[in-house]
Amino acid sequence: MSEMLQLCSYVRFKVPQQILQGLVDVRIPHNSFYRKLFLEIINEKSRYSLHQNMDKIKAPTQIIWGKQDQVIDVSGADMLAKSIPSCQVELLENCGHSVVMERPRKTAKLLVDFLASVHSTDNNKKLD
């Protein structure tokens, strides 16, 4: 768990052993699901599924990506932005894969602002 947190985080957290053990204890009962999900994601059939279907996404979309992501390269954000119409991309400095954990306030503000703008746009369309 400690190694996974290090891989997913640019900011190095000192996580107490009791918390790490708690995370492991919560995860273990669902390990078969996580394993199945991971194998499905890397499966040859689904590996390129998102890329092949991105142009079908019509809903307002927000991408929040850490610039120092070590799990999925930050260039993926640009690829998504170019392929999804009306996509809003936010790149967070000094942040890895776990944007919610590393930058919780910034992530929450971006989400709230995005949802408010989508709601405002929806209301304006209703008035037209």
Image (cartoon, rainbow, N blue to C red):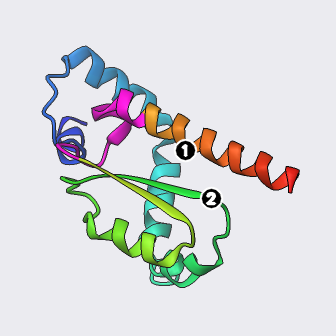
Q: Residue at x 38, y 75 (%)?
A: 79
Q: Position of residue 70 (x, y in %)?
A: 20, 56
The numbered mark at residue 60 is: 2
Which image quadrant: the N terminus? top left
Q: Amino acid at mark 1?
A: Phe
**Spatial distance from mark 1 to mark 2, Cα to Cα?**
9 Å
User: Is 13 inside the magenta-drawn segment?
Assistant: no
Q: Position of residue 22 (x, y in %)?
A: 35, 21
Q: Position of residue 71 (x, y in %)?
A: 26, 58
Residue neighbourhood size for the residue with mark 1, other residues' Cα within 10 Å, grouped as few (<14), some (14–19), many (≥20): some
Residue neighbourhood size for the residue with mark 2, other residues' Cα within 10 Å, grouped as few (<14), some (14–19), many (≥20): some
**Which quadrant would residue 6 be assigned to in this image?**
top left
Depth check: 85 or 18 in front? Answer: 85
Q: Residue at x 50, y 59 (%)?
A: 37
Q: Amino acid at mark 2?
A: Pro
Q: Label 2 near label 1: C-beta < 8 Å?
A: yes
The numbered mark at residue 18 is: none
Residue corresponding to mark 1 = 114
Look at the numbered disc 1 and give the secondary structure of its residue. Answer: helix
Magenta range is 93-107
Left/right of residue 61 with respect to residue 104 in the rendered view: right
Q: Residue at x 22, y 43 (%)?
A: 95
